[in-house]
Structure formats: structure tokens, C-alpha cells
Amino acid sequence: MALINYSAKEITFKIVYYGPAMSGKTTNLRFIYDRLPEELKGKFTSIATQDERTLFFDFLPLDLGTIKGFSIKLSLYTVPGQAIYSLTRKTILRATDGIIFVADSQKQLFEKNIESLKDMIENMKEYGLNLENTPIILQYNKRDLDDIVSVEDLNNSLNFNSFPYLEAVAIQGIGVMDSLKLISKLVVRKIT
Ligand SMILES: Nc1nc2c(ncn2[C@@H]2O[C@H](COP(=O)(O)OP(=O)(O)OP(=O)(O)O)[C@@H](O)[C@H]2O)c(=O)[nH]1
Ligand SMILES: [Mg+2]
């Protein structure tokens, strides 16, 4: 549920980038941070190991502008994809308004996407989040690589709920802003 501060006339939506290890979640946030003008973005916080793997989370606050006199803010988070950080992944889902599931298109990681999506839906339950009350979009990332699964097969294995989906090459910024715009539209629509 969006965080509404009536006295400050401010609404904050929490968006989480979820997905298997190394699928490109942090890369999405970095691109957004590098791309947006100063006045729209806050400080990018990344808690990572030396080899850049997310250890706890990444966090980036953004300003979307004003709707009906309320300033609309987004808090973007990424979860750590590595299996050992299971508890952190769950914790980060608390009070989430929308999720971008970043899937890795590489053939050898096919199963990892399925496992991660199952893990996400299981973890959502803990906080009363489900497919009816939480907008979710799928981002099929790493479309630049050679040995990748077709979009059709990704949809057949992951998209059991007709989630909106996009193709991306996060490392080049392709699909990154479109994913952010789409999830923003879906979460904002819920309260307007
Ligand atoms: N070829 C290619 N590489 C990518 C793409 N997106 C991300 N990568 C690379 O994939 C690796 C992992 O990216 P991260 O963004 O750190 O992945 P993550 O999902 O945050 O990983 P965890 O924090 O461990 O969960 C990095 O070397 C990125 O440069 C892409 O679209 N294409
Ligand atoms: Mg990361």
C-alpha cells in the first residue's frame, strides 16, 4: 500500500526489482540513476560486495511530479538474487506497491527464472501481497546475448498470469525506462 503523508501532501510508491542472481536488477537502477536529471533523483544507495553482487539491497528515490496536488515519489529497490540471501529478499518485499521481475534470457538460466518467480510469489504471501493486489511486470533481459530463450518460451514458462512483459538489454539501457514507466503507471493507477 502506497505511503501517504497528508500533511506533506506526498505519496510514495515502493517498486521492487526481483529476479535471479545476476539477471540485471542493479544494472537497471544504475542506468536510471545515470540517466535522470539531478532534480528528479535522490541519492543512489547500493549495498554490495566487492564484486558488485547485491548484498542487502540497492535503493534509489525518484520524484515523478504532482498529481491532484500530491507530489508523487517512487522508492526503487532491488533484492539480492543469490540463493543465500533468501531472508533479505523476503524482507524487501514488505509494503511493495509494484514489482519488476527481471528474468535472465540466457538458456542455461531458464530454470533459475522459474525458481525465482515461485520464490517471489511465495514471499509475497507473507505480506498479504498477491497477483490481484500487486502490479507485476516481466522484463526479459539480456536480449543482446546469443544463447537465449525465445520470448514465446519465456512467456510459456513464466507468464502464467498474462503479466505485461518487455524485452530489455539493461546494460545498454534498452527497455529500462519503458519498464519503469509501465510499472509506475500501473501503481499510480491503483490510487487515482
Ligand atoms: N550482456 C548483458 N549483460 C548484462 C545485461 N544486464 C546486466 N548485465 C550484466 O550482468 C551482470 C549482473 O548484473 P547485475 O545488475 O549486477 O545483476 P543483479 O541482478 O543485480 O545481481 P544480484 O545483485 O547478484 O542479484 C553484470 O555483469 C551486468 O553487466 C544485459 O542486458 N546484457
Ligand atoms: Mg544486484
Image (tube, grey):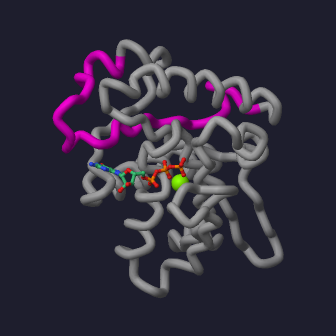
Q: In the image, is 96 to the left or to the right of 118?
A: right
> Where 101 falls versus 45 (above or below)?
above
40 or 139: which is nearer to us? 139
Give the left or right position of residue 142, taking residue 85 as reference: left
Tell me which residue sits at (65%, 70%) in the image.
70
Q: Where 8 falls versus 176 (above or below)?
A: below
Is 135 included in the stretch rendered in magenta? yes
Name the image quarter holding residue 63.
bottom right
Q: Give the magenta part as a residue range.
A: 129-155
Q: Nearer the viewer, residue 140 or 97?
A: 140
**Drawn side of residue 33 relative to residue 55, left or right:** left
Number of numbered discs present? Answer: 0
Q: Position of residue 115 (x, y in %)?
A: 56, 22
Q: Residue furthest front?
A: 50
Indicate the quadrant where residue 9 lies.
Answer: bottom right
Q: Residue furthest bottom?
A: 38
Query: Going by the image, does 159 lie left or right of 122?
Result: left
The residue lying at 29 percent from left, 45 percent from top is 168
